[in-house]
Image (tube, rainbow, N blue to C red):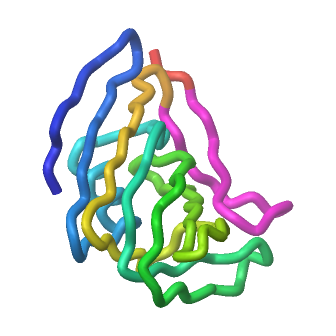
Amino acid sequence: MKINHTEEVGSIKIHCVRLKNGEDIKKSIIDYSAEKSILAGVVLSSVGCVISGRIRLADGKTIKELPEKMEIISINGTLSLDGIHLHISYADREGLVFGGHLVDGNIVNTTCELVIGELSQYSFKRDFDENTGYREIQIIERE
């Protein structure tokens, strides 16, 4: 993973990252967040392509295997040291677009370009929510 540029604009620090062939997108984002100690981040922009992918569908259980090369249309969501919540959208070779929850196994083909905004005035934590059954975001304002 190579960092091309990091800049702070007001209270947002911008991280520009390029993932390369063979890297797992989710694992790479988690590793980068840990390396840079990002307490509250958002994916601002993403493009690229994958050799193969995997997404979790809206039922919260089903994993859909995507065994072909696809274009990344978008990745969005939140990230922190306490966990990530990211969704990904793909276009297949016919231009059909679909997506779901980002899970392990989305392997970069040629590149995945990410722009991540680090929100220095916040810290994101994740706590179990009995109503949803998931670890949901808690937004904490930092002093």
Expressed as whole percent of the image width and height from the top left, the position of residue 138 reads 63, 41
Expressed as whole percent of the image width and height from the top left, the position of residue 78 reads 53, 46
Q: Residue furthest top?
A: 10
Which quadrant of the figure has residue 139? top right
Q: Is most of the magenta stretch helix, strand or loop?
A: strand
Residue, x 18% and y 32% (percent of image)?
Answer: 5
Q: Is residue 124 magenta?
A: yes
Q: Residue furthest right?
A: 131
Q: Is residue 99 magenta?
A: no
Residue, x 35% and y 59% (percent of image)?
Answer: 30
Residue, x 48% and y 90% (percent of image)?
Answer: 67
Expressed as whole percent of the image width and height from the top left, the position of residue 128 reads 68, 60
Nearest the eye: 142 or 103: 103
Residue, x 26% and y 46% (percent of image)?
Answer: 17
Nearest the eye: 74 or 41: 74
Numbered range of the magenta stretch: 123-140
Expressed as whole percent of the image width and height from the top left, the position of residue 114 reads 35, 47
